[in-house]
Amino acid sequence: MSDPHTPRTTDIDWPGATHQLDPRPDHGEDSYVGHGRLAGRRALVTGGDSGIGRAVALAFAREGADVAVAHLPQEQQDADETLALLRAAGVRAVSLPADLRSPEAAHTLVDRAVHELGGLDVVVANAAFQMARPGGLSDYPPDQVRRTYETNVMGTLWLVQSAAPHLPPGGSITVTTSIQAYSPSEHLLDYASTKAALNNLVVNLAADLGPQGVRVNAVAPGPIWTPLIPATMPAEKISSFGKDTPLGRMGQPAELAGAYVFLASGDASYVSGTVIGVTGGKPVF
């Protein structure tokens, strides 16, 4: 039997698709069991077509939430697969193609989510862009750096800015940051710096939205097997992906879902401004 913790797909075109990956990522399709912790909630998950976003959207649906899945237009095939999983859980699920690199796009996305779901209680800002550059600082083209910051930092800020007026007391926002914010890789210089910026943004947003009764937190994943990995990293780095963690392996998207469910649920009613690391043992501080 092949090792489920060793990547075998090493080179696909960005943004990649789930069906291209070997081994196939585990999003909790056969393992996640809901307990009604998000019953009646309405959630928007960006980057929800595949990887971590798909696992989170699926867990939310099985916990009883209606879910709007935002994704790039070219990721519709993955988004359709995700919607089928969510609808099988008996909830309302919609696909909202969007490129969140402008405030107008974020505003339109939020308005559509509110219209489709009848309101909004939970936002997961998970969409991100990365592209490894093994050549060092001089190898980072301006267009890539701009896209990385526009997607990861500005896109998150505009998304929250647009969503905040719709969130009721008890609402929550969770931002996906990264172990890269704490232990940056040289070949992900621009990406790592955006994730550090997001950690800071979460603390400030928690202070800003706390009086409104809205909580803001982050989840910092470690090395997780998603289409983004073989689509954006050098092949020679993928064979050892995750081996440098204390647990000695890469993680699966399903292994993050519980953290997002906790932060969106009433169990986390006094948790705001914090980062939960799901890193295979790498320190988050």
Image (cartoon, rainbow, N blue to C red):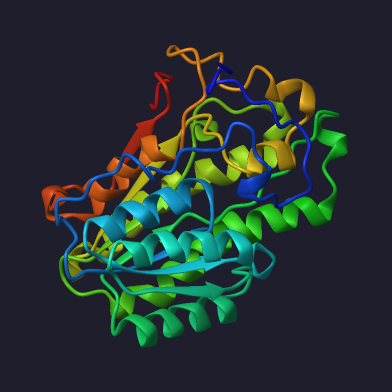
Answer with the quarter of the image where residue 114 lies.
bottom left
Is 225 rendered above or below residue 92? above
Quadrant for the C terminus, please: top left
Residue under the point 44% across and 64% down? 84
Q: Nearer the viewer, residue 126 or 231?
A: 231
Residue under the point 42% across and 22% down? 280
Is 118 rendered above or below residue 272? below
In the drawing, does residue 283 fall left or right of residue 65?
Answer: right
Is 249 rendered above or below residue 52? above
Residue 74: image x %, image y %?
A: 69, 66
Quadrant for the N terminus, please: top right
Q: Nearer the viewer, residue 11 or 196?
A: 11
Residue 273: image x %, image y %?
A: 28, 48
Residue 29: image x %, image y %?
A: 39, 46
Of all residues, the one furthest to the front in this rendering is 1
In the drawing, does residue 237 fall left or right of residue 278?
Answer: right
